[in-house]
Image: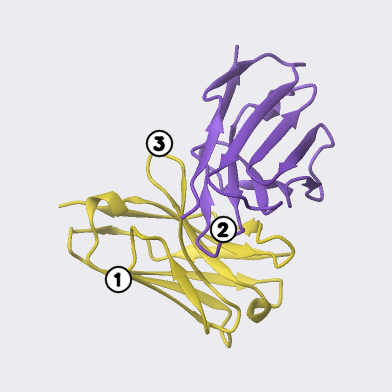
Amino acid sequence: DIQMTQSPSPLSASVGDRVTITCRASQTIGTSLNWYQQKPGTAPKLLIYGASSLQSGVPSRFSGSGSGTDFTLTIHNLQPEDFATYYCQQSYSSLITFGPGTKVDIK
Amino acid sequence: EVQLLESGGALVQPGGSLRLSCAASGFPFSSHTMNWVRQAPGKGLEWVSGISGSGATSDYADSVKGRFTISRDNSKNTLKLQMNSLRAEDTAVYFCAKENSRDGDFENWGQGTLVTVSS
């Protein structure tokens, strides 16, 4: 199975900050990498698919990059509603795996 | 509008069985791979199982292989998860999720149903 790791966790930040979360796959996965945001008590929400494509309706302050094994999610000008947990997910293999999550909390 | 509505969650004893359902609407159900993802209390997301649009192929996480069975009824737009030999570590909120063919991303999720395995 493809293992996914994320760093840092947790991540403390302030409103207005630029935040970068890193995700690493245990083997190359091309650009089959997706990012989700989850707030307590709710289902995950798709932010980025195909490593860098912004899901419809997601604010442009979210961006994704990377290919192969190393990926990043960047949030520019962090807003109060962005404090949440972020997960990466590989869809390269039919045995899908998620990263352990990165909780972004208030500094 | 895409809607996914899970049901069937309950309190069950270790070794018991449970069947979850996910009613789908608002999209061509048979055209999409569907998945189950779970989240144990205070923990991260764990993919459980997926099934192709036709139902011909399915995959399972190692943690549930041999105990859980995924199925779908395309005539009723319904996804199911039969869970047998349940263990305490299966306690979680179970989400159904619609997979996009573009990149295998999960664009739509249900609200989840809670399964508690305890004596």
| Kind of residue indicated by mark 3 | Gly
* Residue highlighted by disc 2: B110
Between the C-alphas of marks 3 and 1, the distance is 26 Å
Name the residue at the top extreme: A107
| 10 Å crowding of disc 1: few (<14), some (14-19), many (20+) | few
- Identify the residue at horizontal 69%, vertical 28% (top origin): A81
Residue for badge 1: B66
Question: Chain A is which colour?
Answer: purple
N-terminal of the pair, mark 3 or mark 1, is 3
As drawn, the residue found furthest toward the bottom would be: B75
The kind of secondary structure element at disc 3 is: loop
Q: What residue type is labelled 1?
A: Gly
Q: Among the chains, which one is yellow?
A: B
Could you say which quadrant of the image residue B53 lies in? bottom right
At x 33%, y 58%, the residue is: B63
Cα separation, mark 2 vs mark 1, equals 25 Å
- Seen in the image, is A11 located left or right of residue A54? left
Q: Name the residue under label 3.
A: B42
Mark toward the start of the polypeptide (3 vs 2)? 3
Kindly indicate whether the residues beneath marks 2 and 1 are on one polypeptide chain: yes
Chain containing mark 3: B
Q: Is residue A27 left or right of residue B39?
A: right
Query: Quick check: B119 left or right of B88?
Result: left
Q: Position of residue A93 (x, y in %)?
A: 56, 61
Q: In this view, does A30 lie above or below B25?
A: above
The residue drawn where x is 65% and y is 77% is: B29
Q: Quadrant of the C terminus of chain A?
A: top right
